[in-house]
Image: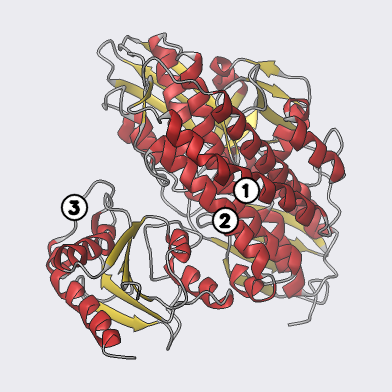
Amino acid sequence: MTHKLTQGDHVLKVDTLARVEGEGAMHIVVHDGLVADVELRIFEPPRFFEAFLRGRAWTEPPDITARICGICPVAYQMSSCLAIEDACGVTVPEELRLLRRLLYCGEWIESHSLHIFLLHAPDFLGYPGAIEMAVDHGAVVQQGLRLKKAGNALMTLIGGRAIHPVNVRVGGFYRLPTLQELRDFRPTLVRARDDAVETVRLVSGFSFPDLVQPQEYVALRSPHGYPLEGGSVISSAGRAFEVGDFGSHVVEEHVARSNALHARLDGATSYVVGPLARYTLNHDQLGPLAREVAHDAGLGDECRNPFQSIVVRAVELVHATDEALAIIDAWDGASAPSVEVLPRAGIGHGATEAPRGLLYHRYELAEDGTILDATIVPPTSQNQPSIEADLRAFVQARLDLPHDELVRQCEQAIRNYDPCISCATHFLDLTMEEQ
Amino acid sequence: MTRPPIVIGIGNPDRGDDAVGVEVARQVAAERLDVLALEFDDPSEALDAWEPEDTVVLTDAISSGGEPGDIHVVDVAEQKLPAGHWSAAGTHAFGLAAIVELARSLDLMPRRLVVVGVEARQFDHGAPMSEAVQAAVPAAAEAVFTVIDAVKGQP
């Protein structure tokens, strides 16, 4: 198909947008050569996780909310643990915080390598998918699979298994890894770190369409380094607030076309969470190796082209593998796998940096620990208004492109966000309509 | 020494009928000592499990619109798996069909690769397998034995 959107009235539809996590739909309306509307539609019924957490025990959210996503279960476990512990007035000891960070590194490695190599790289190398790309770039795909496997193995080592880890509990873990187990894992991580450095070199050589994201960036900022397992909230516009105040700054609103809530900052501003926001607000906290490869890749103090998110993810892969090694090398055991978390009446908040961006949980507990209310704000629902804004600007500048190429580039633009729509939805169809 | 045939059960044991792939592999392991049985909840891990000379049987839940408990045997060397029907509850982005095709693209296919799928109905978190699917486990294990024994008779 070669006709263009500027060549008369027609409705253009693509059935399935592949290579995103989950399912959803994008509908773009072009009126007299101008992009009139861009909507991200979410079809899946609300997932009721918040509803069926009510009435459950304070110990259950890590296991229940991990089920929201098979790609980022650790993020759900970590944010829920922090929130429950906050409600109960408990802070886990330093060694358990480090072990959480190590587990989280595993999830970042697994999730980022899946997205970089199997979902996003085919866009840049001109293939419909990883299967076709593997024919010509077998070594690249194998490198990605090796990295993904290392991430899975780290999650299995600390979390008990790679998908929906079973070793996480409120207050810490059920079992500690042995020193020997951690040391035995070193060679796998060293190889993964080498692969990650190679990955930065590979993806920084891709061609990136021009697009500058004007939105405010929001990420956690932590005294413990590049943000992962906790911190407070900061933004590129100078906002700074504690996670406990998240609910008073971020307002979620129902949008008629979508079952997912759309988040707005202080009621009006759409904003972006995820790798670009983390990098822009925290690049000074990257480890020396990650900083070096970021510099070599041409990244400056901020990165506002969402197409370059693949480079930032690769830099974060370097950071995650490097930091995991540092945690293992410094590990000299913990006195106990967990601390006791006794219930009490109260409200707790927790936020961590899922691979796709900031993930917020809030729980209200009764005196006996029964959950009275739960709120979960996943990264993709925070990014939705910005995905729409990106697409609006992006499509407007490319209406002369042949239909298939325009659709392909739009899909690529959506994949920039690595939308884990499964956390709130399923399937992404792309529909373009000219009026 | 010849490597034993490998049976890989794929699926999440805690998600209703998605457990069937793992259950079939466990049944095979219980009955036959000459088989290497493995379990993965992420199909992409299966790629590293075999060598080029191996005979591999993948067991998984399938959701293709048939009756729960129906058994499908697909010789993957002969035909592609229909996309979208496999590993319904596994990693959403890269299911069994994608992994098999990725192995084909990477020239990582083993000598023989057969998929034994059991039609599933429900993938509820924490639910047991439905009766019809549970009842199909012995027959699916038999299907695995048939594949393995047919290969054994070959040079």
The one nearer the camera, A295 or A6, is A295
Residue where numbered disc 2 is placed: A146
Q: Is residue B67 left or right of residue A157?
A: left
Amino acid found under the numbered disc labelled 2: Arg
Mark 2 vs 1: CB contact within 8 A: yes
Residue where numbered disc 1 is placed: A191
Residue A88 location, x and y as percent?
A: 38, 11
Q: Chain of mark 3?
A: B
Residue at 39% across, 14% down: A335
Residue B141 location, x and y as percent?
A: 19, 72
CA–CA distance in space, label 2 to label 1: 9 Å
Label 3 sits on a secondary structure element that is loop
Residue A424 visible somewhere in the drawing: no
Q: Is residue A318 left or right of residue A244?
A: right
Closer to the observer: label 2 or label 1? 1
The one nearer the camera, B59 or A46, is B59
Q: Which mark is residue B128?
A: 3
Within-10-Å neighbours for mark 3: few <14, some 14–19, many 20+:
some
Within-10-Å neighbours for mark 2: few <14, some 14–19, many 20+:
many
